[in-house]
């Protein structure tokens, strides 16, 4: 089969490799779409602390089941369209024993530690398959994994009906977080972003946006919240400026939640947090339950928003490097999808 293989850091090759060999409890998927994530770029650059090469990248996968090898009955069938929860947990550490496998002490992912979706076929655990609604278009179904992130982070934030939320960073994840915040009942959600292409994309989805280079965020906070601050502030830009903005935008006893996984130290005024008893919450990927819940949420949202707009670029597998370059240069506005069998 054809696959994009990261043979070394910053070196991605289209190669012919053998079909995956299934073990008991695994399924072979014919990949329809595979999405490029920011974490794929981190791995590509050699900045991921545990990734190893060679590896076929990508953990955002939808496909059809070509083969199942499972000694026990399963609800899945050949030809069925599915997505994949891509986490690989040890099952033995303290978080795993307490039902928090998504923050396993030795968590691994498809596409980082085992071959992932930038290939014509990928093997996955049957236990990680999630069925996709029949009426959901492929281009929207391919957003299931990002929306699982959005579902989980909103759940972690404790956002409630009637809350006002600010999302710092309007990339694909920031946009999905904003849409999910509305789904969770927020009365007003505003995305702060400086990239005009991303602002236009968010607005095409019916989202409220602001460019902090042109609008004073403190004045915006005053207008929207009476100067009290936002109930929940999501930081999805991963930038130092975004992180430092959190306590200034958040209300007393409000919640700040960062999606950044960067290990880069940032000087942070914790006194602001203590003085107004704000809560800082971490969020990492999703639980399997939240991944499963995100799929019907995505189906509902697809009836309310033109979500196909979020997948701004679709490239064939031979052009996966072009997709990476777009991500590296910041020239993409939304999600870049790879069509692996076109």
Image (spheres, rainbow, N blue to C red):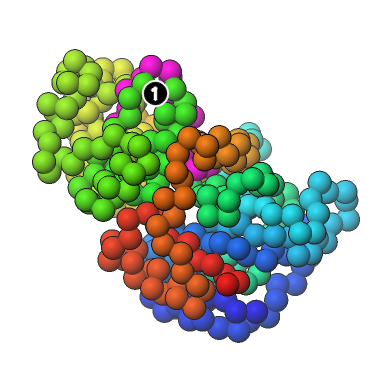
Which residue does the image show at 48% across and 62% down from the upper left?
A: 337
Instruction: Name the quarter where the C terminus is drawn.
Output: bottom right
Which residue does the image show at 42% across and 30% down from the upper left?
A: 181
Give the answer, above or below, for where 306 lies relative to 227.
Answer: below
Q: Is residue 134 magenta?
A: no
- Which span of residues is magenta-colored? 147-166
Residue 127 at x, y = what percent? Answer: 73, 49
Give the answer, above or below, for where 274 lies relative to 48.
Answer: above
Residue 223 at x, y = what percent? Answer: 17, 21
Side of 8 relative to 219 (left or right): right
Q: How many marks?
A: 1
User: Residue 100 occupies which quadrant of the picture?
Assistant: top right
- Residue nearest the viewer, comparing 153 with 93: 153
Instruction: Name the quarter where the N terminus is drawn.
Output: bottom right
Residue 70 visible: yes
Give the answer, above or below, for where 158 lies relative to 123.
Answer: above
Side of 316 relative to 203 (left or right): right
Which residue does the image show at 62% across and 65% down from the upper left?
A: 31
Which residue does the image show at 41% across and 62% down from the upper left?
A: 313
**How many other residues sit within 10 Å of disc 1, few (<14), some (14-19) or many (≥20)?**
many
Q: Is residue 158 magenta?
A: yes
Residue 24 at x, y = what percent? Answer: 82, 61
Residue under numbered circle 1: 186
Residue 281 at x, y = what percent? Answer: 39, 32
- Residue nearest the viewer, comparing 262 with 216: 216
Side of 270 relative to 49 (left or right): left
- Residue nearest the viewer, comparing 251 with 88: 251
């Amino acid at each position: 089969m054809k696959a994009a293989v990261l043979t070394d850091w910053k070196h991605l090759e289209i190669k012919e490799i053998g079909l995956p060999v299934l073990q008991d409890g695994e399924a072979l998927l014919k990949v329809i779409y595979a999405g490029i994530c920011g974490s794929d770029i981190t791995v590509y650059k050699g900045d991921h602390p545990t990734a190893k090469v060679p590896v076929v990248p990508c953990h955002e996968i939808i496909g059809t089941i070509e083969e199942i090898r499972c000694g026990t009955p399963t609800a899945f069938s050949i030809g069925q369209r599915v997505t994949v929860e891509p986490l690989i947990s040890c099952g033995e550490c303290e978080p795993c024993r307490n039902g928090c496998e998504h923050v396993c002490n030795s968590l691994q992912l498809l596409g980082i530690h085992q071959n992932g979706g930038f290939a014509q076929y990928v093997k996955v655990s049957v236990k990680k398959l999630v069925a996709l609604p029949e009426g959901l278009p492929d281009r929207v179904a391919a957003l299931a994994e990002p929306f699982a992130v959005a579902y989980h982070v909103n759940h972690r934030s404790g956002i409630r009906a009637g809350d006002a939320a600010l999302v710092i960073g309007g990339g694909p994840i920031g946009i999905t977080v904003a849409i999910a915040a509305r789904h969770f009942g927020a009365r007003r959600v505003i995305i702060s972003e400086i990239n005009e292409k991303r602002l236009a994309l968010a607005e095409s989805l019916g989202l409220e946006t602001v460019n902090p280079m042109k609008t004073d965020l403190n004045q915006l906070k005053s207008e929207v919240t009476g100067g009290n601050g936002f109930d929940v502030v999501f930081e999805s830009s991963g930038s130092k400026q975004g992180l430092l903005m959190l306590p200034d935008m958040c209300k007393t006893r409000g919640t700040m939640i960062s999606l950044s996984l960067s290990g880069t130290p940032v000087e942070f005024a914790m006194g602001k947090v203590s003085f107004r008893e704000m809560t800082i919450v971490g969020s990492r990927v999703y639980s399997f339950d939240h991944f499963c819940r995100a799929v019907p949420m995505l189906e509902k949202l697809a009836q309310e928003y033109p979500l196909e707009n979020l997948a701004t670029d679709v490239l064939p597998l031979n052009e996966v490097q072009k997709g990476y370059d777009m991500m590296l240069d910041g020239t993409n506005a939304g999600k870049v999808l790879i069509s692996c069998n076109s």
